[in-house]
Image (cartoon, helix red, strand yellow):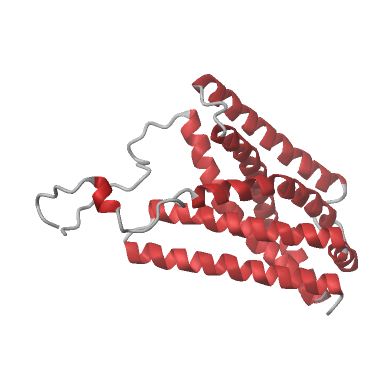
Amino acid sequence: MSAVDLKTPLKRARGLGAGNDGAHHFIVQRVTSVALIPLGLWLIWFGLSLAHASYEQARALVAQPFTAVMLIALVVMAFWHAQLGMQVVFEDYVTPRWREVTMQLLMKAFCFLAAVACILAIVRIALGTH
Amino acid sequence: MPQYERPLSPHILIYRHSFTTVLSGFHRITGVALVVGTLLLIALLLALAAGPDPYAKVQAFCASWIGLFMLFGWTWSLCYHLCNGIRHLGWDIGWGFEIPRMKQTGWIVLAVSGLMTVLIWACVIARGGVA
């Protein structure tokens, strides 16, 4: 960069891409959080139902269509929300940049794989395949 | 371009901690704790799909001291993050920014999340403990 930069901030920003989705992270974080209010309360009920259930009872509970749908919705929203939240935590606290980017990628991979694995497990239980 | 040792955001070591700062910190800490806690949920669902033996192992872990500690911490983290998340959504629509209101809702969040945690574990214990 030259020592004296006479360009206006607008001139410098032009051509660097559209600026109309800057709030995307913020909005998706809020949308998933609203979804997680009923899903989180339902998770408490689900956890309490599982606490004293035998293996067969637990499987029968998860195999119910309503439970399976709620669980899949919860898994999708929770890991999406988690990934967005952890992104901000890493942005704030992890340096240098290469280490931050590595952790961002690992966290996103973890959340994605965990969500896929959980959904597969729920579908297998719901369809009754051992 | 030369690299300078620049301070990290948010500048934890310089701020004077107040009630609301600590609550804000709790929101992050409980959020990270919930991510760690998903490991239990993942283990539970995968074991349930895999068969009775893996499921028995997960149940045994949940009933161990580490398992109980994780479950208890996870319960409070979930209740706190849920209640404080609703407080955050209030701020997002412009409600509750005044300092007295902020402190009041902060105490409500602490009380409600504590009460929810106690009630949940009272339910568990009343029905005979975990697993």
Report whether A1 appears left or right of B98: left
Q: Residue extending furthest top?
A: B100
Q: Quarter of the image for the N terminus of chain A: give it.
A: bottom left
B110 over B44 or under it: above or below:
above
Q: Nearer the viewer, residue B78 or B68?
A: B78
Residue A46 percent across, percent down from the top left: 80, 53
Residue A68 percent across, percent down from the top left: 81, 62
Report whether B75 appears left or right of A45: left
A95 over B78 or under it: above or below:
below
A126 over A15 or under it: above or below:
below
Is residue B6 at all visible to an observer of this figure? Answer: no
Quarter holding residue A95: bottom left
Report whether B67 appears left or right of A1: right
Quarter holding residue B13: top left
Q: Residue at x 51, y 47 (%)?
A: A26
Residue A30 percent across, percent down from the top left: 58, 46
Report whether A24 appears left or right of B81: left
Q: Residue at x 54, y 47 (%)?
A: A27
Residue B86 percent across, percent down from the top left: 63, 37
Q: Residue at x 63, y 40 (%)?
A: B80
Q: Quarter of the image for the C terminus of chain A: give it.
A: bottom right
